[in-house]
Image (cartoon, grey):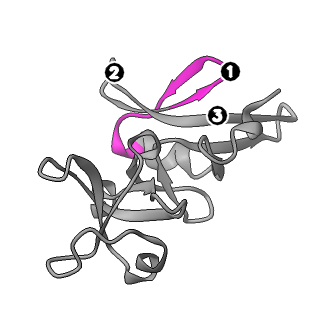
Amino acid sequence: MEDRYLFRGITTFGMWAVGYYVYDEGLDMPCIYLTSKEISVGCKIVDYERSTRCQVSLETLGQCTGLKDKNEKLIFEGDIVKRTDFTLGEVFVGTVRFSEEDMGWEIQVDGIRYGLYGKSHWMAEIKIYEVIGNIHEHAHLLEV
């Protein structure tokens, strides 16, 4: 579950960066300390001497839930997920977000909030969902 401490955001060069979030008050900008050097090619490195970190857009910043979808892909805040209910013959598409009201992760589908709280409930329930995109690059997937 240490993945839950990861964040992702879009860099100033338009690429995704995944790592640990910090707001650098001295430079007055949000940064992600990278967990992989692969992304540094498309990233404006702020301070390569001390660590590999890069500036990201606050609007695209999202925390990892620490959980994986049915394909073992990490699920982040702002992801768009899909669930197919074969019994009803319907497909449900929603967004992953953190509810400050309930202090937990939830999936919002057509304005209805499905709270996924307690570890055992979330772990069992989430395996029926599939990450199909995110709200920053694939908002069209939410259009009905």
Secondary structure at numbered mark 2: loop
* Dot 2 amino acid type: Asp
Q: Which mark is residue 110?
A: 1
Q: Label 2: which residue?
A: 102
Marks 1/2: CA–CA distance: 19 Å
Q: Amino acid at mark 1?
A: Asp
In reply to whether residue 115 is colored magenta, the answer given is yes
> Which quarter of the picture shows residue 141?
top right
Task: Look at the image and give the residue range highlighted in magenta.
Answer: 107-120
Please give the name of the residue rendered at 45% of the width and 82% of the height, measured from the top-left corner.
38
- Is 8 situated above or below 44? above
* Residue at 45% from the left image edge and 76% from the top image edge: 39
Q: Residues within 10 Å of mark 1 (few under 14, many from 20)?
A: few
Vertical order, 84 against 49 (above or below) = above
Are the residues tagged 1 and 3 within 8 Å (C-beta)?
Answer: yes
Earlier along the polypeptide chain: callout 3 or callout 2? 3
**Residue found at the far right of this picture:** 89
Residue drawn at x 33%, y 17% as measured from the top left:
101
- Sequence-wise, the earlier of marks 1 and 2 is 2
* Residue 102 drawn at (x, y percent): 33, 21
Q: Is residue 60 magenta?
A: no
